[in-house]
Amino acid sequence: MRDTILSLSLKAKRERKTHSVVVVLSPLPLGEGPGVRDTIRPLSLMARGERKTHSVVVVLSPLPLGEGPGVRDVLERWDMKNILVTGGAGFIGSAYVRNMIARRPDERYIVLDKLTYAGNLDNLKPVQNSPQYRFYQGDIADRETVHAIIEQESIDAIVNFAADSHVDRSILEPDAFIRTDVFGVYVLLETARAMGVKRFHQVSTDEVYGSIPEGKFREGDPLEPNSPYAASKAGGELLVRAYHVTYGLHTTVTRGSNTFGPYQYPEKVLPLFVTEAIDDRPLPVYGDGMQVRDWLYVDDHADAVDLALHKGAPGEVYNVGGDQERHNIDVTRLILQLLGKPETLIRHVEDRPGHDRRYALDSSKIRALGWSPAQDFEARLAETVRWYQTNEWWWRKIKTGEYMQYFKKQYGARLGAES
Ligand code: NAD
Ligand code: DAU
């Protein structure tokens, strides 16, 4: 609530002159936790008998009460109950669903996922019996499916995690990336616009900027993507922008940095190296291993998406960086240390074509909304390594079939007989 008032007065400084007074009568206490301060939407829901005390909040706002960017518009942001999470069976999407179901008891999370090789219902096991959760298998590029779910579930907001997400696969076979990361985003946007969905959040990536030798990218910097994956994500994002500017769709975008944590498909470097090292297999470090990635813990990434969805301003883009830059070779050594394995497992292999040397983000814009990431990369990495050690049931069954075919294609020539 305090934040709502703040954002009202902030906007007021720039945009409007008239004043309006809004009185919110709520059966919730004013205090911390699930109180009046929390959100507007839960107020009316929880008023149905869960609390006894009442509080009255008066919002004095220099914004008008009317349509458009007035008080009603700002308050309406909170009126979101049914959230469609596309790609919610993947690594970050499933963390978002697991975490938000626990944090936001008044919202329902409806997952639409194609269950590609990277989609995995095991990731959603912890919430599979929750009344706040529902799952649909389907493709974001299929209009009928998207339309039917939005109608059936009275969807208020879409959070799009769905993507083909691995750079190396985009270099081998870009088709699926264009179809999902560009055309799929278009189908979601067009259906959202036509059906009056209130909010659309696009989960994007720092890779849209390309590489930066020093300093940090800011949101207004040019997009210079270097891989088919990064280019397709940039394409999707630009469509999001166009739907905001042209049709007034209420959109937000987050550009996240390299994310790590439990349930990450073992094609990405961190779970790949941890699971290979557990089996005493060689770790294929691309080139000299001096590339820099900025590591972001998965729960922090999910929090940033939630914050941008609920408090982000329409049409805005937010960088989400972990502020934990590390050279790949150092992360590799750390993984080996944590597992008690020798550095002789390291193999410097042929580099990734077009390999971005360094990513770094200035995240002050989302920090100003109230977000901050965990600072201790090493502690989070240790927890994550332990998770893969104690959850072999999760990754061993993945590392068969299609995965092994991909592994041969990607690493066969690089590792030779050791692959
Ligand atoms: P992931 O590959 O683990 O999951 C992607 C999910 O999308 C899978 O469940 C897959 O089945 C689903 N999917 C793919 N195509 C689909 C389609 N056409 N229709 C419906 N579902 C489809 O990816 P992730 O690492 O969890 O990334 C999630 C999002 O975050 C992506 O948009 C990615 O670009 C972005 N991102 C990832 C990172 C990272 O480090 N992993 C960092 C920044 C941004
Ligand atoms: O920066 C955000 C991006 O991070 C996301 O948008 C992508 O979805 C996600 O896959 C990730 O992209 P990267 O290309 O940075 O991640 P990946 O895990 O593939 O590689 C991380 C670094 O490790 C990169 O510099 C390449 C290197 N690497 C990777 C693999 C798979 C190796 O040295 N060896 C490997 O076998």
Image (cartoon, grey):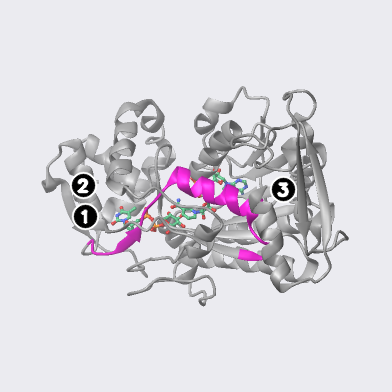
Residue 159 in sight in this render: yes
Q: Position of residue 249 (x, y in %)?
A: 76, 61
Q: Which residues are magenta?
A: 289-316
Magenta highlight on residue 66: no
Are the residues tagged 2 and 1 within 8 Å (C-beta)? Answer: yes
- According to the picture, the residue beneath numbered tag 1 turns out to be 330
Left or right, 316 with respect to 80, comes to left
Q: Residue at x 55, y 62 (%)?
A: 318
Q: How many C-alpha atoms fall within 10 Å of the one at disc 2: few (<14), some, or many (≥20)?
A: some
Residue furthest right in the image: 66
- According to the picture, the residue beneath numbered tag 2 turns out to be 334
Q: How many C-alpha atoms fall within 10 Å of the one at disc 3: few (<14), some, or many (≥20)?
A: many
Q: Nearer the viewer, residue 310 or 260?
A: 310
Are the residues tagged 2 and 3 within 8 Å (C-beta)? Answer: no
Give above or below for 220 relative to 23: below
- Name which quarter of the figure residue 47 lies in: top right
Left or right, 18 with respect to 356, comes to right
Q: Amino acid at mark 3?
A: Ala
Quick one: SS at disc 1?
A: helix
Q: Amino acid at mark 1?
A: Asp
Looking at marks 2 and 3 on the same chain, the residue that comes earlier in the sequence is marked by 3
User: For residue 157, which numbered disc appears in the image?
Assistant: 3
